[in-house]
Image (cartoon, helix red, strand yellow):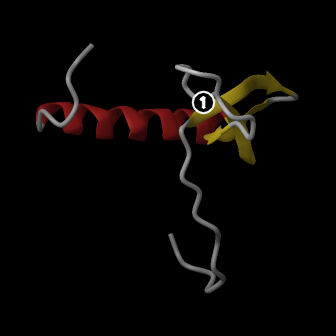
């Protein structure tokens, strides 16, 4: 892939949310866990909420390619024992 020279933002995400398939495209949000602004009570952990970082819309082909690439990488990580199989 050739670079266009313009900088794009980096997102550290904890997961995806609001997955759907509409109008021939996959759609989902990239989300991060953020601490809740309300203080925790005695002996309770501070709650976390999901914050939307970006919304992604992908073609079927692009989504399938992404899933295959991620699965290939996950398999390599498992081979290195960096992630225990579930």
Q: Quadrant of residue 47?
A: top right
Report x, y in % for residue 58: 70, 41
Residue at point 21%, 38% (across, down): 76
Residue at point 60%, 42% (across, down): 62
Residue at point 37%, 32% (across, down): 71
Report x, y in % for residue 42: 59, 22
Is residue 57 among what the camera can see? no
Report x, y in % for residue 14: 53, 38
Horizontally, residue 14 falls left or right of residue 26, namely left
Q: Residue furthest top?
A: 86
Mark 1 burial class by Cα count in 10 Å: few <14, some 14-19, many 20+: few
Q: Residue furthest front?
A: 42
Name the image quarter holding the C terminus: top left
Q: Nearest the camera: 36 or 75?
A: 36
Residue wearing tag 1: 46
The vertical placement of 42 against 61, above or below, is above
The vertical placement of 7 against 37, above or below, is below
């Amino acid at each position: 892939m050739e670079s266009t020279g313009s900088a794009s933002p980096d997102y550290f995400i904890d997961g995806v949310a609001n997955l759907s398939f509409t109008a021939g495209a996959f759609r989902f949000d990239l989300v991060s866990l953020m601490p809740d602004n309300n203080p925790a009570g005695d002996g309770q952990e501070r709650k976390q909420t999901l914050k939307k970082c970006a919304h992604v819309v992908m073609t079927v082909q692009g989504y399938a390619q992404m899933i295959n690439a991620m699965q290939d990488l996950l398999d390599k990580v498992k081979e290195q024992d960096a992630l225990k199989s579930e």
